Image (cartoon, rainbow, N blue to C red):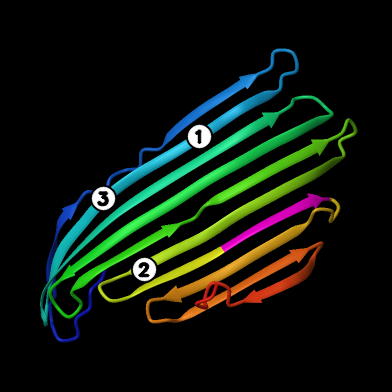
Amino acid sequence: MLYLDSRSTQVTGAVTQNTIGMPSPSINAALSTDPTTGTVTGTVTTTSSRQFVLAGWVKTSHGRVQTQVAQKIDFSNLQQFVSPQALPETFIQDIQQSTAISSTTKVDGGRGSGETTVRMSWPLEMDLTVNIDQFGGFSQIGRVKQAYNRVDSNDDFSSLVSNSGEWADTFPTRQGQSGAQRFFFSDSEGRCFSRALSAAGGVLTSIVDGQGCGDDD
């Protein structure tokens, strides 16, 4: 971090607290193999959670400014497998993943005193099925659902951003191909924007604006 103060020839400060440590993920594999067919089935779960506080002060031309950042991060990934070892086969991989970050920044002194909170999340779901025949030809069915969500708030302002979508496809054909995505923004000052898009078979089928922005929605 670099702090520039145009009214001071020298800026001094110190870190007073730092609890940032190394991540400690947990991995749990619960897989089994069929003794007859060799097919592997089961789940693999990965989780990681950590939190820290980072604080310090800076002596500036407009006074001493103390800042504290407290953050928590949670991650989880669950994958389910069906993996045959002989043709013809149907390989299945389903994924559920979640990432969430919550951060609070407190500033005391100077011109920017106050508290700001940011909460973000990235949920993800994916289902994948691959069919392979005895000659090596294959087809694939896929579905993906994901989103980005963020909420910012301070003493007198808050805002929400959400960008989410869901898509499906069947390779090598377009049968079952579809997609939908929505972007949404609103804040405590009354600003709002919303747009939702839908498609099927590679063709845009609908555009919806304003959903969730009006008093009647």
**Sequence-wise first label, 3 or 1:** 1
Q: Amino acid at mark 3?
A: Phe
Please say if 1 is above or below 156.
above
* Residue furthest right in the image: 135
Give SS at disc 1: strand
What residue sits 76% from the left and 39% below the top? 130
Rounded to the nearest whole Å, what is the CA distance between mark 2 and mark 1? 31 Å
What residue sits 49% from the left and 55% below the top? 122
Split into 4 quadrants, where in the image is the N terminus?
A: bottom left
* Residue furthest bottom in the image: 7
Q: Overall secondary structure of the magenta stretch?
A: strand
- x, y percentage for residue 171? 81, 50
Of the two numbered discs 2 and 1 in the rendering, the one whose residue sits closer to the viewer: 2
Please say if 208 is above or below 89.
below
Pointers 2 and 1 in contact (CB under 8 A)? no
Report the side of 178 relative to 17 (left or right). Answer: right
**Sequence-wise first label, 2 or 1:** 1
- x, y percentage for residue 19? 22, 48
Dot 1 corresponds to which residue? 45
130 inside magenta stretch: no
Dot 3 corresponds to which residue? 52
Magenta-colored span: 164-171
Pointers 3 and 2 in contact (CB under 8 A)? no
Give SS at disc 2: strand
* Residue furthest front in the image: 216
Rounded to the nearest whole Å, what is the CA distance between mark 3 and mark 2? 19 Å
166 inside magenta stretch: yes
What residue sits 15% from the left and 86% below the top? 7
Q: Amino acid at mark 2?
A: Asp
Dot 2 corresponds to which residue? 152
Q: Which mark is residue 20?
A: none
